[in-house]
Amino acid sequence: MKKFLLDVLIFALFLLTMSFHFLPRMFHEIFGLMLAAAVVVHLNFNRGWIFGLTRGNWTARRFFSTLINFLLLVDLILIVVTGICISNYIFGGVIPLDLRRNMTIHQLHVALPYVMIILVGLHVGLHRQFILSKILRQKNIPRGVEYLTLIILIGAGVYGSFLNRVGDRILMKHIFATPATEFSFGAFLFLLIATISIYAIGISWLEKFFKG
């Protein structure tokens, strides 16, 4: 249960750091460092899985899942490093001004979290059975409710992707604010969750397809 609560905390901190337009900029840096610290604790909890990578058979699913985990870690490290480089508050007094104003570092720091949206979605989709077992008390969800939920999430995710200009962000185009930031804080968070859900749902369907 502690691992699951930690996972929820990591997910919540990620959403909060992505919502920096709605929060004081100081909070963005604090939440970012808290996210990094929570991931370190998460890795410590799962050290048995890490040390076990050299054992057992490597199926295609295991390879893909491990690759996603590795890319998530690399992406987070780069986000933290670039964030420290352009810090205006916590590390502002020790980072040289020319580094803080470096446009490439700024663009990387903006682009990499949107790459993480995709990676987080894939990670969630690959671990959906564990997550759903912790969240849902009712085992048998009516088909109608399930389909309606999927339709809402996919529709909102596609809409949110366009509003947040996810593709342009990843391509490092210079964008300060997007139409999504004109929504309320709650609506912005929902669109982020729905965007992540697209990739979780997609990888779930792909797994079912290849399993026949």
Image: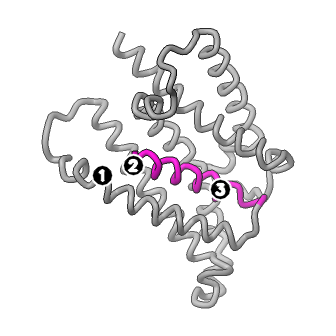
**Pointer 3 residue:** 16
Contact between marks 1 and 3 (CB within 8 A): the answer is no
Crowdedness near tag 3: few (<14), some (14–19) or many (≥20) residues, C-alpha within 10 Å: some
Locate residue 174, reporting x and y percent: 73, 58
Q: Looking at the picture, how far across and down is residue 40, in whole percent? A: 39, 63
Task: Give the residues in magenta.
Answer: 1-22
Residue nearest the viewer, comparing 76 with 8: 8
Q: Residue at x 50, y 14 (%)?
A: 140
Task: Estimate the spatial distance between the alpha carbons at disc 1 and disc 2, rounded to whole Å.
Answer: 9 Å
| Residue 101: percent from left, percent from top | 68, 78
Residue at mark 1: 46
> Dot 1: what SS?
loop
- The picture quadrant where one finds residue 28 is bottom right
Q: Secondary structure at mark 2?
A: helix
Q: Which disc is residue 68 wearing?
A: none
Near mark 2 (Cα within 10 A), the count class, few <14, some 14-19 or many ≥20, is: few
Q: Which amino acid does the dot numbered 2 rest on?
A: Lys
Counting the numbered discs, the total is 3
Q: Which residue position is annotated with label 2?
A: 3
Q: Earlier in the sequence, mark 1 or mark 3?
A: 3
Labels 1 and 2 touching (C-beta < 8 A): yes
Q: Which dot, 1 or 2, sits closer to the camera? A: 2
Q: Main secondary structure of the magenta part?
A: helix
Instruction: Decide which of tag 2 and tag 3 comes sooner along the chain.
Output: 2
Q: For the residue labelled by badge 3, is the local secondary structure a helix, a strand or a loop?
A: helix
**In the image, is residue 60 above or below residue 90?**
above
Q: Earlier in the sequence, mark 1 or mark 2?
A: 2
Q: Residue at x 38, y 56 (%)?
A: 42
In the image, residue 27 lies in the stretch drawn in magenta: no
Q: How much space separates mark 2 and mark 3, taking CA atoms?
A: 20 Å
Crowding at label 1, few (<14), some or many (≥20) Cα neighbours within 10 Å? few
Identity of the residue furthest to the right in this view: 182
